Amino acid sequence: MAKGQFSISPHVVRQLGAELVTDHVTALMELIKNSYDADATYVKVTIDTQGKYEEASLYYPDHKGYILVEDNGCGMDEATITKSWLTISYSSKRAVGGKKKTSKKGRTPLGDKGLGRLSTQRLANICEIISKKENGKGVHAGFDWRSFDTALKFSDVDVPIEAIDWNKPHGTKLILEDLISSSNTWTEDGMVRFKAMLCQLVSPYKELRPFSVYVSINGEKIDLDQEMSKLTKSAVSDITFVYKNQEMKIVADICPRKLLGNDSDTYKRIIENDKGKAFCDYFLSQKNSKNREFNKQVQNYEMSL
C-alpha cells in the first residue's frame, strides 16, 4: 500500500506574513522590538520612499525606496542567521515552561513569535541583513520575498550569504528594499499611530532611557520627546508625586470632561458651572469627610480641574 506524505509550498510563508502581520506599522514595530530584545541601546530607522540605499554593497542594488533599521545590539553570525532568520517560526525568545527568557541585560523579550522576519515582507519585497557579533566577523545575507511565490520547494529560494568586513563592533543592519506602501503610509496622517506606539515603547525619562529610537522619514526627523509632550498635554489627567522631607505630596490635574460620565445634567450642575472648584473644595475638605484616616491622607493632596 502506497503512503502519502505532507509537503509545504514555500508560498505558505507569504500567507503567514499577510495574516500574522496585518499592517505596515505593526511590521515596523516588530523590527524595532527585535532591536530592543537584542540588548541594543538604540535603533535608527530611516525611511526613504523614493531613493536607493547606497552606503553598502547590496545583492539587489536596483530598487525603489528603502527602510533602514540599524542597531548596536548583540548582532548575529552566519549560524544565527541560518537558525533565526532562515528557519521559519523558530524563535530563541519563545517562552519555556510558561516563563519568558531574559536577555544578557535582563530584558524580557517584547516578542516571542518569530514575527520579525515575516514582518519585513509587509514593508518591502527585498530584505538584506548585515550583522556582526562582538569579536566576530561580519555577515551579509539577502533574499527576495517574491521568490516564495514561484518556488516549488524551500530549497529553490535563493539566499546568498557571505562573510564580510564590517568596521562596526557589533550590531545589525536591515535594509528593506523596493518598498510596498500606499500613498499615505509614511505621511504625517499615516504616522499618527506609529508615533503613539513608539512613545509607549520608549521611556519618557530621557536621562534614564536604556533604549532610544531615532526615526527619519524622507529626510524629516521625528522628535519623540516632542511627541510625548503632545500626548501628555492631551491626557485626561496628570498626577505628580513629590517626596520631600519624609512627606509625600500628590498633585492631580484632571480634565473636567473626564468626570462627565453618563449624567450630563449632574456634570453641568456640579462641574461645568465653576470648572470644578466646588467639587475640589468638597473633595479635599476635612470637615465634610467622615473618615479621619482619609483626612490625614489627603492633607497634602492638591487637585485642580
Image (tube, rainbow, N blue to C red):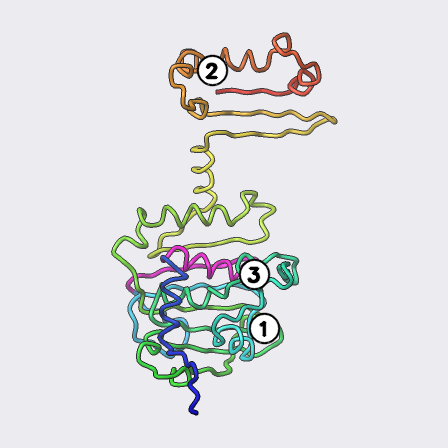
Residue furthest out toward the right: 246
**Neighbourhood count class around disc 3 (C-alpha, 10 Å): few under 14, some 14–19, many 20 upward:** many
Q: Is residue 45 magenta?
A: yes
Residue matched to label 1: 133
Q: Earlier in the sequence, mark 2 or mark 1?
A: 1
Tag 3–tag 1 contact (CB < 8 Å): no
Q: Position of residue 230 (x, y in %)?
A: 43, 37
Q: Earlier in the sequence, mark 3 or mark 2?
A: 3
Residue furthest out toward the bottom: 1
Residue matched to label 2: 276
**Neighbourhood count class around disc 1 (C-alpha, 10 Å): few under 14, some 14–19, many 20 upward:** many
What distance separates the C-alpha of mark 3 from that of mark 2?
46 Å
Q: Is residue 35 magenta?
A: yes
Please give left or right for residue 161 compared with residue 100 in the image.
Answer: left
What distance separates the C-alpha of mark 2 from that of mark 1?
59 Å
Q: Which residues are magenta?
A: 23-50
Quarter location, residue 27: bottom left
**Neighbourhood count class around disc 2 (C-alpha, 10 Å): few under 14, some 14–19, many 20 upward:** many
Residue type at numbered disc 3: Asp
Residue type at numbered disc 1: Lys
Split into 4 quadrants, where in the image is the N terminus?
A: bottom left
53 and 39: which one is in front? 39
Give the vertical position of 302 relative to 106 (above or below): above
Give the vertical position of 231 relative to 264 (above or below): below
Residue furthest out toward the front: 1
Question: How many numbered callouts?
Answer: 3
Task: Determine which of the numbered discs, if any, sits on residue 162 in the image.
Answer: none
207 and 125: which one is in front? 125
Please name the residue shown 65% across and 11% down the image. 290
Please give left or right for residue 300 compared with residue 137 in the image.
Answer: right
Q: Nearer the viewer, mark 2 or mark 1?
A: 2
Residue matched to label 3: 37
